Amino acid sequence: MASQNFTSAFLVDQSPEEAFAAINDVRGWWSGQIEGATDELDAEFTYRYQDVHYSKQRITEFVPGKKVVWRVLDAYLNFTEDPNEWTGTEVRFEVAQHGEQTEVRFTHLGLVPAFECYDKCSSAWSFYVNNSLRRLITTGQGEPNTE
């Protein structure tokens, strides 16, 4: 049976190391206020976008050039009946060489269709991962909102 966790993947011409570096430059592709280190094992950082979304992540896996995993320790979404839907979920980025290209695979483990925020959250992730992060990897300039 296929996983229902939200997943997205794309290929780029850059190396796995370049893709990995861009992923961990979270401020370069994800909108909002980000406080704390986003590029080392066991680091914790917070994300806040206006009064709409707050989350606190701990980096639980950090394998340079290959994989980074964030465990969501705390979360608040102001547009869901259960504002803590993300708490306890994991955000995973996996990087792998495929021939002459690099695949970036994003999975939000626990973000499933049964979640009230699934449609909005998966749509937002699709933009930030497939557009903003991909652009940061390929051009050096992501597309985070300036707010």
Image (cartoon, grey):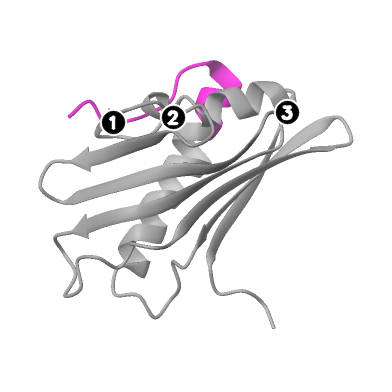
| Residue at the image position 19 percent from the left and 66 percent from the top | 83
| Image position of 45 with respect to 124: above or below | above
| Residue at the image position 28 percent from the left and 48 percent from the top | 55
Task: Calculate the distance from the C-alpha at mark 2 to the C-alpha at mark 1.
Answer: 9 Å
Check residue 100 in the rendering and tell me which mark sits there, or answer none. none
Tag 2 residue: 38
**Element at label 1:** strand
Tag 3 residue: 16
Quadrant assignment, res 121: bottom left
Disc 2 + disc 1, Cβ < 8 Å: yes
Quadrant assignment, res 64: top right
**Element at label 2:** loop
| Residue at the image position 35 percent from the left and 75 percent from the top | 115
Tag 1 residue: 34
First-in-chain label (3 vs 2): 3
**Element at label 3:** helix
Locate the C terminus and report the quarter of the image it occupies. Answer: top left
Residue 41 locus on image (x, y percent): 54, 34
First-in-chain label (3 vs 1): 3
Amino acid at pointer 2: Thr
Locate the N terminus and report the quarter of the image it occupies. Answer: bottom right
Residue 124 locus on image (x, y percent): 36, 51
Direction from residue 87 to residue 138 in the image, left or right: right
Q: Which stretch is magenta?
A: 134-147
Amino acid at pointer 1: Ile
